[in-house]
Image: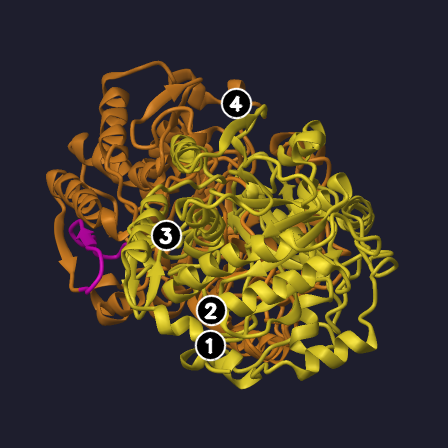
Chain colours: A orange, B yellow
Amino acid sequence: MSRSETPADHDTAATPEKTRHEAALFELLRIPSVSADSRHKGDVDRAADWVEARLTGMGLTVERLATPGAPILFAQSPPVPGKPVALVYGHYDVQPPDPLDEWLSPPFEPTVRDGNVYARGATDDKGQMLTHVLGVESLLNAGGELPLQVKFLIEGEEEVGSEHLDAAVAANRDKLACDVVVVSDSSQFAPGVPAVTYGLRGIAYYELFVEGPKQDLHSGSFGGGVTNPANVLAKLLAALVDSEGRIRIPGFYDDVAPLTDRERAEFARLPFDEERFLKQLNVDGVSGEVGYTTLERRWARPTCDINGLWSGYQGEGAKTVLPARAGAKVSFRLVPDQEPEKITAGLRALLEPLVPPGAKLTIKPHHGAPGVKFSLESPYMEAAAAAIEQGFGARPVYMREGGSIPIVGTFARELDADVLLLGWGLDDDNTHSPNEKFNLGDFHRGIQASAALWKQLSECGMRSADRGMS
Amino acid sequence: MSRSETPADHDTAATPEKTRHEAALFELLRIPSVSADSRHKGDVDRAADWVEARLTGMGLTVERLATPGAPILFAQSPPVPGKPVALVYGHYDVQPPDPLDEWLSPPFEPTVRDGNVYARGATDDKGQMLTHVLGVESLLNAGGELPLQVKFLIEGEEEVGSEHLDAAVAANRDKLACDVVVVSDSSQFAPGVPAVTYGLRGIAYYELFVEGPKQDLHSGSFGGGVTNPANVLAKLLAALVDSEGRIRIPGFYDDVAPLTDRERAEFARLPFDEERFLKQLNVDGVSGEVGYTTLERRWARPTCDINGLWSGYQGEGAKTVLPARAGAKVSFRLVPDQEPEKITAGLRALLEPLVPPGAKLTIKPHHGAPGVKFSLESPYMEAAAAAIEQGFGARPVYMREGGSIPIVGTFARELDADVLLLGWGLDDDNTHSPNEKFNLGDFHRGIQASAALWKQLSECGMRSADRGMS
């Protein structure tokens, strides 16, 4: 069903409430809360203050969970006996904005073009997180009580691996106790095709350093006589993937949960337009693991991607230098049931023997998280589908996502709760890229779906037996 | 023979003339004439002005050869009938100073420590070039006429491949006509072991760009589904060299002039201390082409070195980005009789078939020059040896050099002249590295050797038959 036919569109016209909601979003987007960059620590704190004030303002009791890292906000409405408890998770930190020169408007000056708001964090995750804050706020403003207890857990380190959240969750299990966790930090399948995401990939992220001579050398006087760390790094990186796109780390595929026939069939049924996909990215084709479709490779197969690379002279002109060191950032997307720790061991086992005399390799693990997959049978899944239909005017499809939300696995394990991944974003939102955007229509539809969700969930039983990770 | 025993050391005590000579050197070193960086164009011009003023001041007729690039200075003393003509070549431009934070004193603030002057360009080539300017100047100041006509050709683009010099030489063949070219832009074999260098490696320098999606993407949502340009670049770079350190470009070794038994024997006789070499570089070993010694690999075998590498996120922390592009600077050192043009064709033939769908490879040749080797039989070689013995108090050894001085081949071809490569530098001068230095004792010994050289050369015949490239 195309967007223009959806009921949600009848009310895309500006209303005082929508204007208030957009004003709130733009305020938060103006705060450059880049968690990866220590120079932005003050901005990260400011974003936390902003969210805390909003949650307090709508009458929730708010506190900050003890953490050595960026503030972790916890808020809750009064308990509603006999009804399930819902926990909303989101994050107020954002990715670094670089490369800055590719932004059409400043990353922290929200700008509306064609019904989209452009800003770093618009969709990941400030905009999507706010749909639930504002969805609850609108029910409360309407004078109503909430039909069930809603809790919020909003952190500021998601973009750097949620370093301190696992500990905070473990330390506050009772406080966070809930039946279902709601996370909006992903995408719809396509415009007008909302989705419930039932699986996420995990990640194992590394930094590789190769050190050679104590300083840069003249590549003429020393070249050939000395081990070149950049040459070594290239060899190591090339050794990670074979000619069929399979990762060469020993045992890498041992624990990979294979795609079921039902999954492959459902993926194949989805309206995925490969031609449009290529045009969107402006590439003449794609490549990857042999034997899998593009969607399968993006959602349900593990990967190896170089995320960063540096060595020697990167400036203008030709410097004949033999670099003293070279480095790379490399990450592997994992699928159930791969374990990051095993990947780290395998990575060392593969690379260390390949380092020649005169070079020293250091492998620094950054962060890791296993992939997750949830049962489609839980009643909360059905409640989510109904709420989405009310907000978006279309039944959601069930899909998986290639990205990682490390904390989702933690919730499933620590809180023994179902997790509903309700993405309001779109595939071309430029998450983690220049010109990140969020469709304002989807922003408002998300708020409506959120308001509807609390009612739908309140009609579910308190804990179903068949729930949990499949 | 150790430095302290050499006659030259009897006069390392300061004299008014030495003080004047060092003042001149430091003045020139203070000018940051970095030719690779267009922001330093003004400084490159200032360095040219300084050298021009010095040459004019000593009574030579100076002019600038027409060029679209940095100034090319030509100077000459009056002709001396019946005597050979000598042409001194040097350059006043320098390498970029980065990485800046590794310098112990500012790169453009000459600082003396342990009898060495530390500054970018100290040895490459401002200091060595000046020994001839001041060697000639001292003879002229002594009221004497020069015993033969001396010409100077001093350029400002050597560190970026002498882009415009070949054309200038070709256009001024008559003006530059000479019997012998003198170049001091290399090293002694060791402290107290001066050398005449009879061979240089050539170079073929390239920039590789791999372009993928039109912008950086989220490595989670897109990883595995899209070709990663950084992964592709690593594969291409790793494909350049095999496990035995041999370069895999088709036909790469076809034209390589093999080391003669005499050369291998003479290299083996040289007092090269591999242990000291490793300690100097702070490495636990070296690696390279199998079957050759370290000196052979550095002087007389071709190489492949990555000089620079960049892609994606290089900042602090872990950014999960699938980069839109990746690039590398790669250079091959060539030996006689390899041709850069053939290397370029072979490089394309090797790499282009390895580029997968979804990635675009661009190979940009930067500059190229063939390697050269001169006959040890020319009378000018003997004259140089005698002059060096007067200046340094030791007979020179005959060696080759791994670096390239592209213009040397041009002189041999265009001017049909012998080229004397008389290096006053040392192996650990940190050429092209932080903390570049030049020994002030060698600076003054070089000036004495230069003064002696003009007399020695004036006693040679005008052109010997057996000269030229071997």
Both labels 4 and 2 in a single chain: no
- Mark 3 to mark 1: distance in Å? 42 Å
Magenta region, residue range: A67-88
- Give the image location of residue B269, x and y in percent: 67, 83
Kindly check if marks 4 and 2 are in contact, taking CB atoms under 8 A apart as contact: no
Please, what is the three-letter code of the amino acid marked with disc 4?
A: Arg
Check contact, mark 1 vs mark 2: CB within 8 A: yes
Tell me which chain the residue with mark 2 is part of: B
What residue is shown with label 4? A3
A59 vs B457, left or right, is left
Q: Are marks 3 and 1 on the same chain?
A: no
User: Badges 3 and 4: C-beta atoms under 8 Å apart?
Assistant: no
Name the residue beneath numbered marker 3: A159
Q: Residue at x 41, y 59 (%)?
A: B436
**Image quadrant of residue B296?**
bottom right
Identify the amino acid type marked 2. Asp
Disc 4 secondary structure class: helix
> Where does label 2 land, which residue?
B428
* Rendered-image quadrant of the C terminus of chain B: bottom right
Question: Residue B363 appears in which quarter of the rendering?
Answer: top right
Which residue is at 73% across, 66% downward? B301
Residue A202 in sight: no
- Label placed on residue B280: 1
Alpha carbons under labels 3 and 4: distance apart: 31 Å
Q: Chain of mark 4?
A: A
